[in-house]
Image (cartoon, coloured by chain):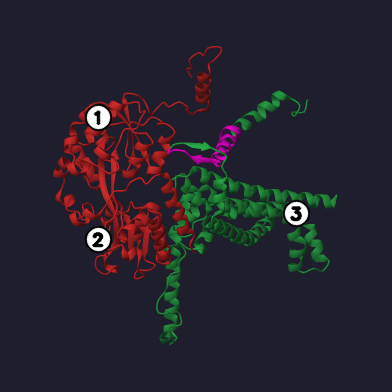
Chain colours: A green, B red
Amino acid sequence: MEPWRRSAAAFTAFCGPTILWLSVFFLIPLGIVWLYSFGENVSLTQIETTWTLKNYARILDEEILVLLWRSLWLALISTAICLLVGYPVALVIATSQPRWKPWLLLIVILPFWTNLLIRTYALLNILGTKGRLNESLKWLWVQADGALDWAGLGDLALLGDRFVPFKFLGTEAGVVIGLVYVALPFTVLPIYSSLERLDKSYLEASLDLGAGQLRTFFKVLLPLTMAGVVTAAIITFIPTLGSFLTPDLLGRGQVDMIANVIERQFKKGDDWPFGSALSLMLLYVTFIILALRSINDMRKSGGRA
Amino acid sequence: MNRPKRPLRPTRRNVLAGGAAAAGISLLPTKGFAAGKLNFYNWDTYIGETTLADFTEATGIEVQYDLFADNDELFAKLKNGNPGYDLIVPSSDYVERMIIAELLEELDHSKIGNVKNIEPVFMDAAFDPGRKFSLPYMWGTIGIGYRKSAIEGVPDSWKWLYDSDKYAGRIALLGDAQNVLGSALKYMGKSLNAWSDENLAAAEAMVIKQKPHITAFAPDNGQDLLLSGEVDMVMEWNGDIIQVMGEDDDLGFVVPKEGGLLWQDTLAIPKGGPNVDSAYAMIDFILGAEAGQKIAETINYATPNAAAKALTSETYQNHPAIFPSDEVLAVCESQKFPGQAVVQKIDAAWTRVKAAG
């Protein structure tokens, strides 16, 4: 049989729909956004592409840089937490008994079965000053305070006069909790798959030759699964950077990220060209990250060859 | 399946329709936007329970009812050509925006007998002089919703939200620039339409200074924050507070003495709609006494329809959050469209408020 790559008919049949789909629903709209980003509002309903650069120049305004920095910072922290939490989780799944694996993986994937908006509202319910988390902490506080009273230490008020609820909503901490919650499955899965593929005899060899558990982890396991960790970091970081819903709801308008500014340009702010320039800038950031990664990969494989 | 035979060389249109039918989707409108009907585009929960059915019964015109979430969505839908709506419900400044953008059909008042029911004060508007393009549907205010037991007296000044740390950490403002900065202008004794660079900068500085005391810039859930006890005072649309006042007696609403926004939602006919006559019929129907009464008492907003108001209950007519006092009304203003360049300046100021640490 002829290889499918040389058969024009087979190629069209297999790739045609995909290419059509991509161009109609992705490339063409993206092209329009690209043209808008060099445009100006000429009337309330019209945008003219004048190849002006002023929309891109406005990205350098102080307030935009501040919000960009905040977005990068929150995305970085969230990614770091995801990696710290996600790696052990992936390790547990990868080393568990085969009959448990599908179930453990299912737990990781389970949140995807519920809409993000609903999950975020659930978080609102948990994180509020009178939310479930604070109410539980309050209960613990009351028990502990009662115990101190019983021990005769009540007058010292060691735990304060009354329980002061933690403020999660409207703070960066609350937004990070939300971002981590949303992104965690994206971190666990690539790390898990790289752990799965790892030949376990490397670990046995390391332990047999006298390295301790910690040393085996840092010198053998981690380097061998680094590719998975990098993939996990990238696919956690990129969507987190562009998060809209999480800062919008959990941030209560106090912790806006760059996507919240972009949304406003297409609604209240009524400045589609500036909004387009901002969204494309996020896209460029993504490209740069991916490019750095492949340069790094090439260097590595070049070094080995 | 019984498919009609196709010509051997299909036209482009046939290919589109056929391909779409095969894929189980519809590119060409089938259900909505038909002629001889009415395609009504309104806000959610903003009509009487039986209004649409009553209208169909009275006129024989079927109604296709669609919902939008805010004026920006409405404007965005229409700005690149009317997709088929006959009757829309834009608010004050957006009416002006649409008039400038030539999106609205000029109204022929002689086709609407019930225009006579509208209170005379509403027959002119800064955003639509002479009411050539829009007729009033409902009106209301933005004010302060508060928890009576947690606040000293009645918080009848914007001061408590904008210029005081007395209730720090227990207050919320709205999430949109023009209203938040506009009310700051009112507090400073200026018109909420006075968007000079100097005024805008002063309003921005005031909100940034107050920001650490503010719990939330609530996009559309200020009333829920108040109801759940997360905050004790919110800047909100009167209708949203009325809603939660029904659930909790401890909640109150006041329009500050400095005055605030007097908003108005209107009935307007967008250009290019397929059923202009049906739209006129619906406007006339809604402005009728009975239909107007039913709508007003269902949604609990203030009606500009004198004949309808006369039929409503006393509870409705004397509700302090629906109808503010005349003194307060005298200092309230409706919002004008300041022009696209100024809208963008206001938004930039808002971004600086959001970026402030």
Name the kind of residue labelled 2 in the image.
Lys
Q: Quadrant of residue B171?
A: bottom left
Name the kind of residue labelled 3 in the image.
Leu
> Compared to A161, does A237 lie above or below?
above
Q: For the residues marked 3 and 1, what is the alpha-carbon distance in whole angstroms?
A: 77 Å
Q: For the residues marked 2 and 1, what is the alpha-carbon distance in whole angstroms?
A: 38 Å
Name the foreground residue: B185 vs A109: B185
Q: Which mark is residue A56?
A: none
Check if mark 3 and mark 1 are on a common chain: no
Residue corresponding to mark 3: A198
Residue corresponding to mark 1: B108
Residue corresponding to mark 2: B257
Left or right, residue B25 beside residue B218: right
Q: Which residues are magenta?
A: A22-44
Chain identifier of the residue bearing label 3 in the image: A
Residue B131 in magenta? no
Label 1 sits on a secondary structure element that is loop
Chain identifier of the residue bearing label 1 in the image: B
Left or right, residue B168 beside residue A265: left
Q: Residue at x 74, y 67 (%)?
A: A213
Q: Residue at x 35, y 63 (%)?
A: B162
